[in-house]
């Protein structure tokens, strides 16, 4: 009976009830979105450097080296020689060395010059075959595509494309002397690799040759068949070690090498440094979310208390029918808790939908992915506790106001 009476009471005051629900929902969206998106982005950045123990490049600063090598943001100011890469590639303590050459693009997507070890790296990250279609390049003028590149541009294995010099969306220098044939499309990995094209180191070197010399190369030239195509330098390279205990030892050896100035960074440490620089952003966003929650709480309380005067007749009628103060108190608790719970439920639902939309944007634009893991048990308990607490508080205030006016 009491629940049915509370429902009818809320329906009779549907406009004010709707305002209360909307305020609670909006504050829930603000608070939950800030928290989950920030944590999700941190998780996505960590996922992008999985299976990488060290990133090596010319001395350019930890964060700069991390951004252009792992996230394809920015460009290297200096390069590291191929001899340094070869030395560590042949080191018995190195399980995998992945070379990276940068500087070219295709319709706004970056081109990475690398070798077959890149696909071994992707297989280790995904723990399955990294190719959704086709296979890795085997010839100089072949290219593989990240998942987002193929999806957005509509390419399929067998298609041909032209690479451009530079990172911009509109390049004035296209390497038209030779086209590249698509041999494979990578599985979606939720990393920046999804938004790149991969060609061989020989292929990157070849397209920068004079057009006449480039045109003279065989169409089916195998990788490594022409020693003149071996590059002199790389933007950076990844190292995965057989024994993780040696990570700091190898890092020190690279950083203190007298053969060539080089820099080795721990990607996890560099990401921590990056996020530590953005702590104030997290604090500001969380503060705004809490402020929105406080505004909503004050708004709901003031709305309910404002309508208290209009309900005096209703409460007097209930008393005439034999209702006691505890009955009115329980009725107010149910009404308030229902409003808060419904508002929070709508807020959580909208937050999940909003985050899925944001995830789609983050994956398509920046190649970032994070699972929307929600502890529904904890969230349900928190919603129930907050609803009851707010119901008890506002009902206590309302009952005290009623006693004073009697």
Image (cartoon, grey):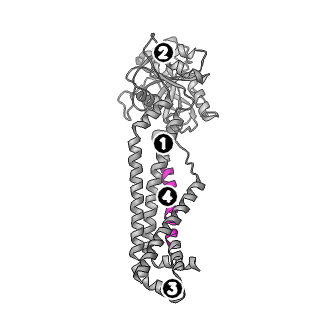
Q: Nearer the viewer, residue 75 or 230?
A: 75
- Residue under numbered circle 1: 41
Q: Which residues are magenta?
A: 335-357
Per the model, the C-alpha gap separating discs 3 and 1 is 54 Å
Q: Are marks 2 and 1 in contact (CB under 8 Å)?
A: no
Q: Is residue 187 magenta?
A: no
194 in relation to 211, above or below:
below
> What residue is shown with label 4?
350
Packing grade of label 1 (10 A; few <14, some 14-19, many >=20) is: some
| Rendering quarter of residue 76 | top left
Q: Are marks 3 and 2 in contact (CB under 8 Å)?
A: no
Q: Is residue 115 above or below residue 271?
A: above
Magenta stretch mostly in which secondary structure? helix
Which secondary structure, mark 4? helix
Point out the frontmost of discs 3 and 1: 3
Q: Tag 3 or tag 4, which sits nearer the N-term? A: 3
Residue 82 disc label: 2
The residue at the point 53 percent across, 82 percent down is 324
Instruction: State how far apart marks 2 and 1 are (Cα).
Output: 34 Å
- Marked residue nearer the N-terminal end (2 or 1): 1
**x and y percentages locating residue 388 in the rendered image:** 53, 66
Percent coordinates x, y for residue 237 in the rendering: 50, 22
Q: CA distance from mark 2 to mark 4?
A: 51 Å
Circle 2 — which element?
Answer: helix
The correct choice, above or below, for 15 with respect to 43 in the image is below
Residue at the outermost front position: 404
Residue 135 in view: yes
Q: Which comes before the other along the chain, label 1 or label 4?
A: 1
Q: Are marks 3 and 1 in contact (CB under 8 Å)?
A: no
Among numbered discs 2 and 4, the one appearing first in the sequence: 2
**Residue nearest the observer in this picture, 191 or 322:** 322
- The residue at the far bottom in this view is 320
């Amino acid at each position: 009976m009491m629940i049915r009476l509370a429902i009818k009471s809320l329906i009779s005051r549907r406009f004010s009830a709707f305002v209360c629900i909307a305020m609670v929902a909006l504050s829930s969206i603000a608070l939950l979105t800030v928290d989950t998106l920030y944590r999700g982005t941190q998780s996505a950045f960590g996922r992008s450097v999985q299976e990488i123990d060290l990133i090596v490049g010319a001395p350019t600063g930890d964060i700069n080296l991390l951004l252009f090598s792992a996230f394809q943001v920015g460009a290297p100011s200096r390069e590291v020689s191929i001899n340094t890469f070869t030395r560590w590639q042949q080191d018995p303590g190195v399980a995998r060395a992945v070379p990276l050459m940068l500087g070219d693009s295709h319709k706004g997507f970056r081109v990475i010059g690398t070798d077959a070890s890149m696909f071994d790296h992707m297989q280790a990250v995904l723990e399955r075959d990294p190719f959704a279609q086709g296979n890795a390049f085997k010839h100089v003028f072949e290219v593989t595509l990240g998942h987002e590149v193929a999806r957005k541009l509509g390419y399929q294995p067998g298609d041909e494309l032209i690479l451009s010099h530079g990172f911009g969306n509109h390049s004035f220098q296209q390497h038209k002397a030779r086209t590249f044939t698509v041999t494979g499309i990578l599985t979606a990995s939720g990393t920046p690799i999804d938004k790149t094209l991969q060609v061989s180191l020989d292929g990157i070197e070849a397209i920068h040759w004079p057009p006449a010399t480039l045109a003279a190369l065989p169409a089916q030239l195998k990788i490594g068949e022409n020693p003149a195509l071996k590059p002199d330098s790389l933007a950076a390279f990844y190292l995965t070690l057989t024994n993780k205990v040696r990570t700091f030892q190898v890092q020190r050896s690279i950083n203190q090498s007298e053969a060539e100035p080089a820099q080795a960074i721990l990607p996890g440490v560099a990401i921590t440094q990056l996020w530590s620089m953005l702590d104030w952003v997290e604090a500001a966003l969380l503060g705004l979310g809490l402020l929105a929650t406080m505004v909503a709480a004050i708004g709901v309380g003031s709305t309910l208390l404002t309508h208290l005067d209009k309900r005096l007749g209703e409460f007097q009628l209930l008393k005439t029918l034999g209702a006691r103060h505890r009955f009115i108190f329980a009725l107010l608790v149910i009404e308030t808790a229902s409003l808060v719970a419904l508002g929070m439920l709508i807020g959580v639902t909208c937050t999940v939908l909003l985050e899925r939309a944001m995830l789609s944007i983050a994956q398509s634009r920046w190649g970032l992915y994070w699972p929307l893991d929600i502890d529904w048990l904890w969230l349900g308990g928190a919603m129930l506790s907050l609803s009851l607490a707010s119901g008890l508080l506002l009902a206590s205030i309302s009952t005290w106001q009623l006693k004073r006016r009697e």
